[in-house]
Image (cartoon, rainbow, N blue to C red):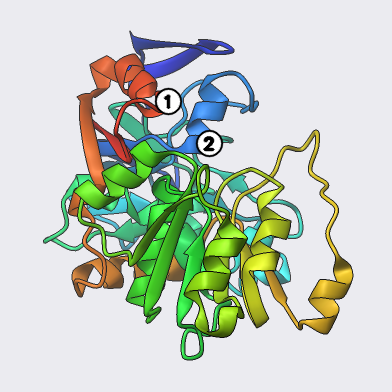
Amino acid sequence: MKAAVITAPGVIEVQDVEKPSPQSGEVLLKVDASALCGTDQRVLRGEKPVSVSIIGHELAGTVEAIGAGVTGIEVGQRYAVQTVIGCGECAPCKAHHQIRCIHGFKAIGYAWNGGFADYMVMPKEGVDQGCLIPIPDTMSAEVATLLEPISCCVNGLRFFPFDEIKHVVILSGGIIGVLNGLVAKAWGAETVTIMNRSQGRLDLIKELGLPFENLVNTSTTDPLAWVKENTEGGLGVDGVVVPASAKELVPLGMNLLAMGGHLSIFAGMSKQDPCESIDLNAIHYRELHLHGANSSVRRDYEEAIRLIETGKINPDPLITHRFALEHFNEAFKTQADPDVKSLKVVLQH
């Protein structure tokens, strides 16, 4: 089979490698489509270590073969893949909240080979946990690759009380910022404002016809001044999402909030420099709510499917580029190039 293999830090080669076979309790998937994400970029550039040579965690596939002892799964069924696999024994895992596994969860594409290959194996731990998420017959494999990132946004925004929240600001116009904005709209936000430093990115969002009320270029417009001018009484917005790994966005997001507002710190920050000075009294006296968000679990995938199936989110405009797996490095460069108008880059297998 063909696979995009990391042969050295920052070096990826599409190679012919041995097709895996499912062992007891495992399931072999033929990968139908996979997609690149920002974390993949960090791994492929050699900035983030992983324990496998084939990564990729946004994927959809068809069951090719089943290992001994597997029940409830049949050859020919189509699935998306839940990335996170917990220990299965601690209290969070038993409550189906594996992203809070007290022993530290493992992930497809990080601890086990992922989807940038013609075939991949779902390990027994993932099969037992229920990490194979059935895809509706009406959903294409390409669209199903979006279930993982949408599910992460679902998890991050669960803490926002959308019966009270009217205006949400997203502090990035990348694909994760866009998906957070789409989930916020789907859950009832009346106004979603995307703020981004690149006018090209904002132009792309407008060209794609995405349903956001405001697109603000923060390289030419002060975000705080804009919020004061565009909220009732200049009091601030109800919710802010930080979907980019720029720690200075956290205090900025706090300053954009109205009293009692909610801030989702969606993105992880550099482990070498994760600290930023913030005014703790602002949290105390303004009764702000700060929420962390890290990956997703099965219920979040199921909600992502519901949002697409009911038309609350239209995923079709988000896939801007498609490549065959053989052209993996071209896809990688396309996603990494800020001058290319791309949102989601999908690999066709």
Callout in the foreground (2, 1):
1
Q: How many marks?
A: 2
List the residue tagged with mark 1. 336
Q: Tag 2's secondary structure? A: helix
Instruction: Find residue 119 and report its horizontal and vertical position in percent.
Output: 31, 31
Q: Is residue 333 above or below residue 182?
A: above
| Rendered image: mark on residue 39 | 2
Q: Residue at x 29, y 71 (%)?
A: 307
Horizontal arrangement in the rendering, residue 161 relative to residue 333 (left or right): right
Q: Is residue 95 visible from the viewing direction of this image?
A: yes
- Mark 2 is surrounded, within 10 Å at the Cα level, by few (under 14), some (14 to 19) or many (20 or more) other residues, namely few
Q: Quadrant of residue 261?
A: bottom right
Q: Is residue 62 visible from the viewing direction of this image?
A: no
Front residue of this view, candidates 319 and 191: 191
Mark 1 residue type: Ala
Q: CA distance from mark 2 to mark 1?
A: 11 Å
Q: Quadrant of residue 1?
A: top left
| Rendered image: mark on residue 160 | none
Q: Tag 1's secondary structure? A: helix
Of pointers 2 and 1, the one earlier in the residue sequence: 2
- Looking at the image, the residue that sits furthest to the bottom is 163
Q: Is disc 2 in contact with disc 1, using a CB cutoff of under 8 Å?
A: no
Q: Quadrant of residue 224?
A: bottom right
- Mark 1 is surrounded, within 10 Å at the Cα level, by few (under 14), some (14 to 19) or many (20 or more) other residues, namely some
Instruction: Find residue 135 and report its horizontal and vertical position in percent.
Output: 24, 59
Q: Residue at x 64, y 62 (%)?
A: 253
Q: Residue at x 72, y 78 (%)?
A: 288
Front residue of this view, candidates 6 and 211: 211
Instruction: Find residue 142 and report its horizontal and vertical position in percent.
Output: 22, 44
